[in-house]
Amino acid sequence: LREGTSLTDCPAEAVGVRALWQPREQAPAFRAFSSAAELNAAMPAARELLMCRMASNGVTVVDPVNTYVDPRCSVAPGVTLLPGTILRGHTAIAAGCEIGPNSMVRDCIVGKDTTINASQVNESTIGSHTTVGPFTYVRPNCRIGDGHKKFRCTIGDDVFLGCNTNLIAPVTVGDRAYTAAGSTVTDNVPDGALAIARARQTNKEGWADRLRALWKKNQ
């Protein structure tokens, strides 16, 4: 902590959990290393210590060997960390969350009962009962609210979704329907129909050459 910063300004205290690396009544302990090699050699033992402390606090770490937690982080009881999870900085994870697989959360506050799946979240606040991912990138300074009112898509039997199809909920794709590659579907697709939802390609002759010439002129 910076000098003069109160504990209530910490993300860990904001969700009511303590940092992993020390009990409240103990002063922080530091160990000096004279080389990167010494530091690397000490990391497995330090990571094992963190995993043991989390387990004793009621945190489930499915694969400790492939889970990395910054000691500045706070993880509440009842959290599950799946393989490939990386928690960095002053991240605070509230009770009941499931993080991973293959997710990185950096300097974030995550509310209760939230899922972050195969995503990267940076310097943001994620509300309770929220689902992030899979394959989501959250840039810094975002606030994602509680996920109580989620729209859903319904996909029928024997449906073929073309490559890079996006379904914007709520939509229903009927039985035996097809969607064309690259379509962004915003309306229901009837049974047996083909949905084509993409703009017609337009070629701007010479546009790229003019842009490169402008770049070269401004160098």
Image: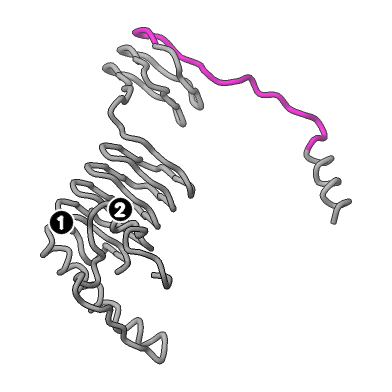
In the image, is 34 to the left or to the right of 74? right
Query: Tag 1, which secondary structure?
Result: strand
For label 2, the residue is 14
Vertical placement of residue 94 versus 163, above or below: below
**Range covered by the magenta-colored residues:** 189-207
Q: Nearer the viewer, residue 17 or 201?
A: 17
Image coords of residue 182 (percent x, y): 51, 27
Question: Callout 1: few (<14), some (14-19), or many (20+) C-alpha neighbours within 10 Å?
Answer: some
> The residue under label 2 is which amino acid type?
Ala
Quarter where residue 137 is shown: top left
**Residue drawn at (21%, 77%), measured in percent from left and top?**
26
Q: Nearer the viewer, residue 197 or 46?
A: 46
Q: Main secondary structure of the magenta part?
A: loop
Magenta residue check for 70: no
Query: Tag 2, which secondary structure?
Result: helix
Q: Quadrant of the N terminus?
A: bottom left
For label 1, the residue is 60
Image coords of residue 97 (percent x, y): 22, 47
Vertical placement of residue 69 versus 176, above or below: below
**Residue drawn at (30%, 78%), measured in percent from left and top?**
43
Sequence order check, earlier mark of 1 and 2? 2
In the image, is 54 to the left or to the right of 13? left
